[in-house]
Image (tube, rainbow, N blue to C red):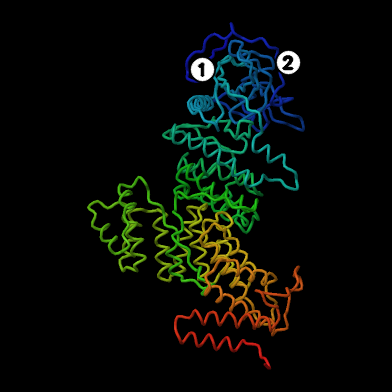
Amino acid sequence: MTTVTTADGEAAEEPSATLLEKPLSDQMAPIPIMDDPQVPERRRFCPSPECRHPVGRAREGRPGRVEGFCPQCGTEFSFRPPLRPDELVGDGQFQVQGAINYGGLGWVYLAWDRRVSRWVVLKGLIDPDDPDNRQAAVAELRALAHARHRNIVTVHTVVTHPHPLTGGDVDYIVMECLSGKSLKQLRDERPDSDPYLPVDQVCRFALEVLAALEHLHVRHSLLYCDVSADNVIDSTDGVKLIDLGAVRRMDDQDSPVWGKPGYLDPEIETHGPSVATDLYSVARMIAVLSFPFPDFATDAPIPGQDEVELLDLHPSFAGLLRRATNPDPHQRFASAADMAEQLEGVLREVRAVREGRPFPAASSRFGPELRVVGTDPDSFPAVDPVAAALALPDPRVDPADPHAGLLAAIRVKDLGEAVRVLTTLADPSLETRLRVVRSRIQLRHLDTDADLDALAEQQPGDWRVDWYRGLHCLVEGDVTASQRHFAAVLDALPGEAAPKLALALCAAREGAAELAARYYATVWRTDQSYVSAAFGLARAHFTLGDIAGAAIALEDVPESSRYAIPARLCAILARARGYTDGRPPVADFFTAAEGLVTLGLDERRRELAVTEVLETVLRWERADRPWPAEATTRIPTALLGHQLNERGVRDRLEVAYRELARLAPTTTEQIVLVDKANECRNRSWI
């Protein structure tokens, strides 16, 4: 006799009267049935809770007994599935097709629901008399019954059925049958030449898992406790968590801890299961699916960027894994939603690399960049370091802050007045104190250090304190300290662009142009709303002597940007300023120079650029016109409407200097420019 209970714990109506007698043989099984199902020898123990002696093990070359009696206590054992093919459970509603898997808590079966004509999965216990296992199974039922979510397998009901050996009731959870493969299967089926899943695909899978965990954590105060590549199915209905046998309430301090080697957080022994331990397991799953991890089954940490090429290619991806698996659980992500937010940023960076196009998105942590500095063509590639620091994006104001409305309404241009208003509030909030600090940093106020110390004491571990410390140090010229604080922000927020922009500024000021270029390239490749990244990348390339790279970065600024024309002009001038006598100019130098005519510049700005370009061309002419051997284009015959030879260049230079003299604001400048025009003038006998 079996008993059927709904997922909510109520007795189900008698199903036998409405059974659909469609022959099972007419249905194609969606999941392969095991040919000879039996418990692996390493997991065979006496079923008696008081004994637990190893039984059914191989001896002297002979395989272990699958059925028999314990030599220690005489208890009968069987390591075959207790449910046989075609056996009916649940008052005849469910017809067993066979075992499909042996999980951490018991056998899993495919069955046909004769009442509604659908495939279902039954999951039972390994040891029906083991109280720990039964407690875990009940926890799974309760969790699944209430935690309905698109990324969690659906529980239909629970049935009990007598065990063939003990006669005692065994609980079987009836779940939806998912057509798909586990993430571990997907990885295992990869070819030897490319044995790991694409990192962008793994990130997408992980985002679905994190959505399910956030639902369990926040809506139901439940911990999953057994995230692994085995327990996640890529089904036709999306990614699903399929095994909630280890689920426990957050306040549960007594239930046994389940988990798999490699996924189980070693800190769980000290701190117990928590949100942090679930997130640790997600990160370990991401790692083992994405790249070689030979010591995965141990407590070995995530490999370093110098050990794994993928991590070196995607440093933000590496940073996310480091934070989620930090040995100190308090340094990990605060929630699954927080981790998902950063993983989305990381995924955008990964896709930008793999697909060669940007994937912009607004940040919930930082506002847009305040301004773009270093765009003046006259001074490129120079940039004011303080202005660049103060142009970095500011952290967004928490909308839940009691003074958020006041801060949004403040439009005081005088920062000193803004500070006075905010410091006289009777009930200052965290956000008003942060705004005061930001204003005082810009004012170079003497109290800034004391303000930051007070905030650090009040808000330990708040990344915004590190952000403003880094900004303060950068403005005051302490680049080493600034790097340390901005690196802490990036550790906390690996998917954000702002800390990468800040660290790029630090690297550039330290003379580490290659590192600066890497940070700027990551930001610009991913999100072209950060135009300062394009100019910063160009400056870094220029410093490294890569003039073509500098020009390409600037020409990549979209035409829709207000900085498109300054960027194009800087690109042309970068080609001119990067030229040294005797070295061939960039192959597309002349083509780019022709663009001066179509940029829509005012007359003075255009002629200034023309003179700089033509002075460079004149030096090139005097150096016997060197040309890159690998160039795919030939030297043009004309430039800016004149022949491309010394006479033609001098003619156009003379015109440019005379135009500038006409537009000069003072007589002194006019005289200087006329003299330059005369110097350029071609000699004539007439």
Question: Where 367 sits versus 289, above or below?
Answer: below
Residue 128 image point, x, y percent? 56, 21
Which of 323/302 is in front?
323
| Residue 412 seen from this side | yes
| Residue 381 seen from this side | no
Which of 309/548 is in front?
548
How many numbered markers are drawn? Answer: 2
Label placed on residue 624: none
Indicate the secondary structure of the residue bearing disc 2.
helix
**Disc 2 crowd, CA 10 A, few/some/many (<14, 14-19, 20+):** few
Indicate the secondary structure of the residue bearing disc 1.
strand
Image quadrant for the N terminus? Answer: top right
Measure how far apart labels 1 and 2 are at the Cα level.
27 Å
Question: Where 155 sits versus 616, above or below?
Answer: above
Q: At label 2, which amino acid type do we have?
A: Ser
**Disc 1 crowd, CA 10 A, few/some/many (<14, 14-19, 20+):** some
Which of 367/48 is in front?
367
Image quadrant for the C terminus? Answer: bottom right
Q: Find out whether the residues at labels 1 and 2 contact each other: C-beta distance under 8 Å.
A: no
Label placed on residue 6: 1
Which of 55/583 is in front?
583
Label placed on residue 25: 2
| Residue drawn 65% across the image and 88% down it | 682
Q: At label 1, which amino acid type do we have?
A: Thr
